[in-house]
Image (tube, rainbow, N blue to C red):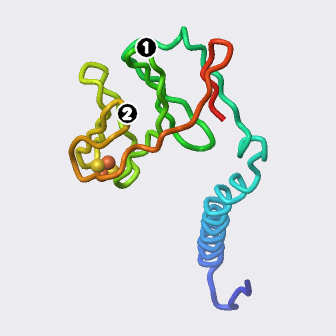
Amino acid sequence: MTDHPHEKKEDVSRRRFVEVCIGGMGVASAGAVAYPVVSFLGRPASLEGAQTIRIPIDELNEDQARYIDWQGQQVAVIFTGRVPKAFSASCSHLGCLVAWDNVKHVFHCPCHGAVFDDQGNPVSGPVSKPLTAIPFQEADGHIVIG
Ligand code: FES
C-alpha cells in the first residue's frame, strides 16, 4: 500500500482498515472451502471398507428398527416375525432416508411418499425398485454386517 501525499491521516487509516477486513474475509472464505476437502481427504482408511458391525440378536425387539451407520450409509435393521432383516435406509427413488413404521410394518419415505414392506419391496409411491438388502450373517447370537 502506498499512501498518497495529499490524503489525510484518517483516510489512510480508514483505507487500511478496509483492506484488512477484505483480507480477513478472503482468508476466512478460503478456510471455509478448504476445511471440508482437507477433513475428507484426511479420513482414516480404517473407516472405509472393512468395518464390521455386530448386533446382539437378543437386543433387537420384535417389530422395531435399529438404524446404524455402516460404511458411510444408514442401514435399517428390523426384526419382524422373529427374523432379522437389513436394508439400506436410502430410498430407491432419490435416496431420502426411509423411516420404519413399527405399527404397519412398512418403511415410509418422507420425500415423495414411497412405501416399502418389511422385505424392502415397494408397495406404493414413485418407486419400482426395492430397498437394497444389506447382507449379513448370524453368528454366536449376533447379526454380523460387513
Ligand atoms: S426419495 Fe423416496 S419417494 Fe422419492
Drawn side of residue 4 relative to residue 108, left or right: right
The quadrant of the rendering that contains the N terminus is bottom right
Image quadrant occupied by the C terminus: top right
- Which residue has dot 2 on it? 119
Residue located 65% across and 64% down the image: 24
Whole-percent x, y for residue 97 in the image: 40, 41
Residue nearest the observer in this picture, 117 or 3: 117
**Mark 1 surroundings within 10 Å by alpha-carbon count, few (fewer than 14), some (14 through 19), many (20 or more):** few
Residue sticking out furthest to the bottom: 5
Q: CA distance from mark 2 to mark 1?
A: 13 Å
* In-front residue for pair 137/107: 137
The disc, 2 or 1, on the residue closer to the chain's N-terminal end is 1
Q: Position of residue 103 (x, y in %)?
A: 26, 19
Q: Nearer the viewer, residue 102 or 30?
A: 102
Determine which quarter of the picture holds residue 16.
bottom right
Residue linked to disc 1: 82
Sort mark 2 into few (<14), some (14-19) or many (20+) by Cα contacts within 10 Å. some
Across and down, in percent, residue 85 comes to 47, 27
Percent across and percent down for residue 144 are 64, 26
